[in-house]
């Protein structure tokens, strides 16, 4: 049945590394990041993705192909749709979590695709569903490095756990900036 998880999310294996230029370009789109999130624990066809993103299927197919070509999205077994048409469901591979994008310049037009994807997702569910907090800190360079490492270790621990099929879906966005 469409919309139900087809299997427990596999554990993410591997170490973080800088992306290749092709991988960085593939992740430089809020639409592609949203496709990855939607396909994280359920396989979706291009038609289903286009409907959920409220976008043209041809445009979404371009993004899907880019993600497949770069290994961030994998096709599953072909199936027949309601009218007998050939459909290919796609699933996120988890590879995007292994990409270390820290310090990479934002692509033109200079909007961070992670932030743009987050804002689109919040817009889709409504700001009343957002749980957020802010914190101002004064840290030495060593303390800042420790803080970042501990935050990343916590996120990495949860990213590598198998998904709970009965669990609720949540997204986490973390942004840090120096104060001006």
Image: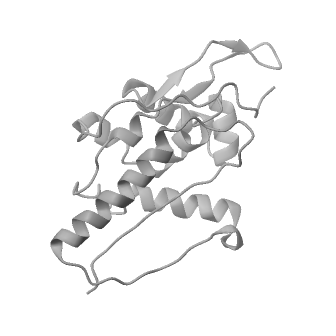
Q: How is the image coloured?
A: one colour
79 relative position to 10: left or right: right
4 relative position to 13: left or right: right
Foreground pick, 42 / 154? 154
62 relative position to 28: left or right: right
Please state, as top left, top right, bottom left or bottom right, where the N terminus lies in the image.
Answer: top right
90 relative position to 145: left or right: right
Q: Position of residue 105 (x, y in %)?
A: 23, 57
Taking the image as drawn, is residue 132 in sight?
A: yes
| Extreme-bottom residue of the structure | 180
| Residue sitting at x 47%, y 51% | 30
Residue 43: name its quadrant: top right
| Residue sitting at x 62%, y 53% | 170
Q: Position of residue 15 (x, y in %)?
A: 30, 35
Foreground pick, 83 / 17? 17
For residue 178, above or below residue 119: below
| Extreme-left residue of the structure | 141
| Residue sitting at x 40%, y 42% | 97
Residue 55: name its quadrant: top right
Q: Position of residue 22 (x, y in %)?
A: 27, 34
Please state, as top left, top right, bottom left or bottom right, where the C terminus lies in the image.
Answer: bottom left
Taking the image as drawn, is residue 26 in sight?
A: no
For residue 3, above or below residue 159: above
Residue 58: name its quadrant: top right
How many numbered dots are placed on residues in this image?
0
Q: Position of residue 91 (x, y in %)?
A: 56, 28
| Residue sitting at x 64%, y 37% | 49
């Amino acid at each position: 049945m469409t919309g139900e998880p087809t299997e427990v999310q596999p554990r993410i294996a591997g170490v973080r590394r800088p992306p290749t230029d092709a991988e960085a370009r593939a992740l430089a789109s809020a639409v592609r990041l949203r496709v990855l999130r939607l396909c994280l624990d359920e396989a979706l066809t291009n038609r289903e993705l286009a409907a959920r993103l409220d976008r043209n299927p041809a445009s979404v197919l371009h993004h899907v192909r880019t993600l497949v070509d770069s290994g961030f999205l994998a096709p599953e077994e072909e199936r027949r749709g309601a009218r007998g048409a050939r459909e290919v469901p796609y699933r996120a591979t988890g590879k995007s979590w292994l990409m270390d994008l820290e310090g990479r310049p934002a692509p033109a037009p200079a909007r961070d695709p992670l932030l743009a994807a987050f804002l689109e997702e919040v817009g889709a569910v409504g700001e009343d569903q957002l749980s957020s907090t802010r914190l101002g800190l004064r840290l030495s360079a060593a303390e800042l490095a420790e803080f970042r490492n501990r935050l990343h270790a916590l996120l990495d621990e949860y990213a590598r756990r198998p998904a709970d099929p009965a669990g609720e879906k949540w997204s986490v966005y973390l942004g840090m900036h120096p104060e001006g």
